Image (tube, rainbow, N blue to C red):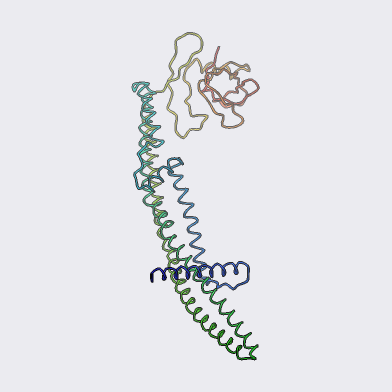
Amino acid sequence: MNIMDFNVKKLAADAGTFLSRAVQFTEEKLGQAEKTELDAHLENLLSKAECTKLWTEKIMKQTEVLLQPNPNARIEEFVYEKLDRKAPSRMNNPELLGQYMIDAGNEFGPGTAYGNALIKCGETQKRIGTADRELIQTSAINFLTPLRNFIEGDYKTITKERKLLQNKRLDLDAAKTRLKKAKVAEARAAQLNTSQPEENNIMIWAEEVTKSEQEVRITQSEFDRQAEITRLLLEGISSTHAHHLRCLNDFVEAQMTYYAQCYQYMLDLQKQLGSFPSTFLSNNNQSSSTSVQSVSTPSVLASASASLPSVSNSIVTSGISELKSSSGSRKARVLYDYDAANSSELSLLADEVITVYSIPGMDSDWLMGERGNQKGKVPITYLELLN
C-alpha cells in the first residue's frame, strides 16, 4: 500500500513538473515570460557540435555511396548489420565483368587473339575487384566506423545531456516566475494592510516568497551543475575533430593504395595486350577471299579519333590517296561504330555505307562523310572503300 502511495505521489509530482515546464515553454514562445540565456561559450560549443553532427552525417552517407553505389546492396548490408549477421558474399561489378570476359574468351577460344585478350582483361578486372573489396573493408574500419560511432554514441550522449539542460533551465525559469509573482502579491497585500485578515495574508505571501526563493536556489544549482556537465561533453568535440582527422588520413591512404594498384594492373594489362597481334578483315567486293592486315596496338592515352591503328593494306591506302588527290567521292563501308567527339564529326554505325570525299587542307587521317542530310569528318581507319 505504501509503495502504491509512493508511486502515485511520484507520478503526480512528475506530471506537475511536466506541466510547469510546458507552461514556461509556452509563455516564453509567446513572449510572456523571461528566459535564462546560456553563456556565449556554451552557445558556441552547442553550435559547433550541431555543425559537426550535420557534416559528419553527410560525409558518412556520401562515402557509403562512393564505396557501394548500389542502393539495394547498401540496404541489404544495413539490414544484416542490424541483425548482427554477415551479409552473403557476392561478386562486385569489376569481378562480374571480369568473369564474363573470361567466360567469353574461353568460348571464343584461348588460342585466338580476341579470346586471349578477353581472358587477360577479365583477370585484370577481377584483380581490380579484389582491390575494390580491400578499399571498402579498410575504409569501413578506419573511416566510416569512427564517424558512425560519433553519431550513434558521443552525439547521442550530448543530445541527452542537452535536453536535460533544457529541462533544468525551464525549471529554473518557472521558479523565477513563481518568485516574481509571489513578490508582486506580497507587495500588493502590504498596500492593502488595513485589517487583521490582511496581516495573515501578508504572512502567507511572505512564506510563499521564502519558499520560492529556496526553490530558485535549488533549481539554479541544478541548472549550473547540468550546464557544466554539458560544457565538458561539448568541449570533447575538439578531440573528436582530431580523431576524425587521423581517420581521414587513413581513408586517403586507402584510396591512394587502391588507385595505385588499379593503375599498375592496367599498365601490366596494356603491356600484355601489346604482345597480341590484332587484325582487320578487309573486303573490297572483288573476291570472297579476305586479306589480313596487321596493326599496331593503340595507346591507352590516345584520343578517340586515333584510338584505332592505321590500315597498312596497300589497296585501301592507294584508294584513299587517289580519293584525296581527286575532287570526286566514293562509297565506303563503316567497319566499326564511332561516336562523334564534336559537332564537326559524324557518328558512324558498323556495316553502314556512306559517301566520303576529301576537301583541301583536311588532315590526312580524316575524310568528309555524308549520310543523307548529315555530314561531318570521319576517321579513315574506320572505313573500307568500295568500288
Quadrant location of the N terminus? bottom left
Where is residue 110? Give x, y as percent.
34, 23
How far from the left and from the top, in percent, is residue 302?
Answer: 48, 33
Please, is residue 12 above or below residue 355 in the view? Answer: below
Relative height, residue 80 to residue 373 (above, below):
below
Identity of the residue furthest to the front in this view: 1
Q: Nearer the viewer, residue 339 or 154?
A: 154
* Image position, residue 118 (x, y; %): 38, 27
Give me the residue at 57% from left, 25% from top: 378
- Image side of residue 116 versus residue 20, left or right: left
**Foreground: 371 or 360?**
371
- Residue 47's x, y, as percent? 52, 63
Looking at the image, the residue that sits furthest to the top is 287
Q: Nearer the viewer, residue 237 or 148?
A: 148
Q: Quadrant of the C terminus?
A: top right
From the viewer's perspective, tell me whether residue 19 is left or right of residue 9. right
- In the rendered picture of this protein, how many numbered marks are placed on residues? 0
Q: Residue at x 36, y 28 (%)?
A: 102
Rendered image quadrant of residue 179: bottom right
Location of residue 184 with respect to 106 vertically, above or below:
below
Q: Nearer the viewer, residue 250 or 181?
A: 181
Would you identify the image quadrant in which residue 173 lies?
bottom right
